[in-house]
Image (cartoon, grey):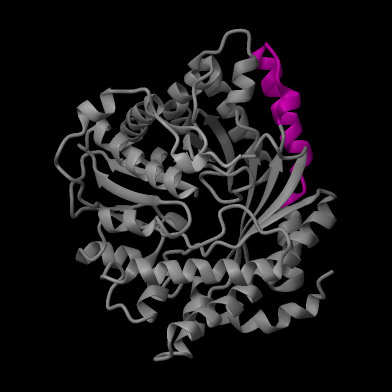
Amino acid sequence: MINPFEILETINMIDHENLDIRTITMGISLRSCAGQDIDTVCKKVYDKITMYAKDLVKTGEDIERQFGIPIINKRISVTPISTLIDALDEPTVEKCVQLAKTLDKAAKAVGVNFLGGYTALVHKGYTKGERVLIESIPQALAATELVCSSVNIGSTRAGINMDAVKQMGETVKKAAEITADKNGFACAKLVVFCNAVEDNPFMAGAFLGEGEGECVINVGVSGPGVVKCALEKVRGKDFGVVAETVKKTAFKITRMGQLVAQEASRRLGVPFGIVDLSLAPTPAVGDSVAYILEEMGLEKCGAHGTTAALALLNDAVKKGGVMASGYVGGLSGAFIPVSEDAGMIAAAKCGALTIEKLEAMTCVCSVGLDMIVIPGDTPASTISAIIADEAAIGMINQKTTAVRIIPAPGLKEGDEVEFGGLLGTGPVMPVKPYLSDEFIARGGRIPAPINSLKN
């Protein structure tokens, strides 16, 4: 049991260093809603979501007021929707979009910020429903405001489904084109994973995995500004001191998340799942992972040494977090979404940060190539190849990697896209002009690496 007075030492962090709970995410299983008739399924889905999540937003706001802790988002994750599509008498794109609209309607009814789980897990192969659901993603995301989608195309145990990689490159391209009036905004709600996790509370990749229960509360904490301020006090000290400082700070941040998670669980009568202790940045000045790396001594994020600095940060965050909670999960590390991080934006604009450097950085941190805007005329095969590269990093290194990339229609390198809110501003970053068409056209499955044979 956490004593609420433990939160007092974080008051300064909240007031001056951008510390917050980034999200309370309620996971809801929709497996009981499966059926052959789409209208019946949609009604069951709407009723179940609105029943379980009816008090989620109010509870979050009550906790926020009582403890003085900012809770930025209240969200919902659901069972991969492809499970419901598979059970229909005849899956079609139209039925998928109808279900997506139902999810959007339910999310709006309970007042959450986003709902994740318009998802298919195809790392080893497709079912008929999964293939149709992926085909429907551009239309579904264009027709909804709050629905987020993810597709897992690879894993360490299965290898990489290159047919799915090809399809996802085409899907990302189409999603951008169909929302060209919003600079391809649908792509900001779409993540392509390798080694997706079942309890991730962060969007756009959240879904409730098959191994989860009926309903669960997962919390995602954040605090890049807090870590940077802590490191300002140890300037010039060696990396042992740096790592220890980050560990102690991560412990305090995670302790606050544990308090909020347990309190939300108690008030909602829903089991507590995990605390995801990821450092999730925002466009706000000072709330940046890039600034942490620069505080370690780099002139600009992206300079030589950035990957080493990020490795230290990610490891220290995890070591501090696991001491604060027995139920750390999700992605848990440092996020590096370009458009959502003021320091990353600045580094990308001046050329210090490139897609190639970001790819190297994803070897040692959470997730992957995140919220990266590229020229609108980038071929679908190039997008697929970027996805394949990132999936390979995840597969070989037994970690979660992902791609959330936005080919902004009509824009070119050097332009900027304004998404607003937490999604920030995306500078259009260059991609290699050399084609990968023949590579992607091969299809099939890249075999799992030898390190997958653990038994």
Q: Residue furthest left?
A: 433
Query: Residue 185's spot in the image, x, y percent?
Result: 38, 42
Query: Residue, x 71% and y 30% (percent of image)?
Result: 30
Query: Residue, x 61% and y 72% (percent of image)?
Result: 320
Visible residue check, residue 404: no
Which of 153 and 282 lies nearest the eye of the viewer?
Answer: 153
Residue 47 in the magenta stretch? The answer is yes
Quadrant into which the N terminus falls: bottom right
Query: Residue 361's spot in the image, x, y percent?
Result: 36, 59
Q: Residue furthest top?
A: 89
Query: Residue 209's spot in the image, x, y percent?
Result: 65, 38
Q: Main secondary structure of the magenta part?
A: helix
Q: Is residue 126 left or right of residue 187?
A: right
Residue stretch in magenta: 30-56
Whether residue 131 is situated above or below residue 3 in the rendered picture: above
- In this figure, what is the number of numbered marks? 0
Residue 340 in the magenta stretch? The answer is no
Q: Is residue 411 left or right of residue 102?
A: left
Query: Residue, x 46% and y 57% (percent of image)?
Result: 421
Query: Residue 20's spot in the image, x, y percent?
Result: 60, 68
Quadrant into which the C terminus falls: top right
Which of 164 and 431 lies nearest the eye of the viewer?
Answer: 164
Whether residue 248 is situated above or below residue 373 in the rendered picture: below
Visible residue check, residue 233: yes
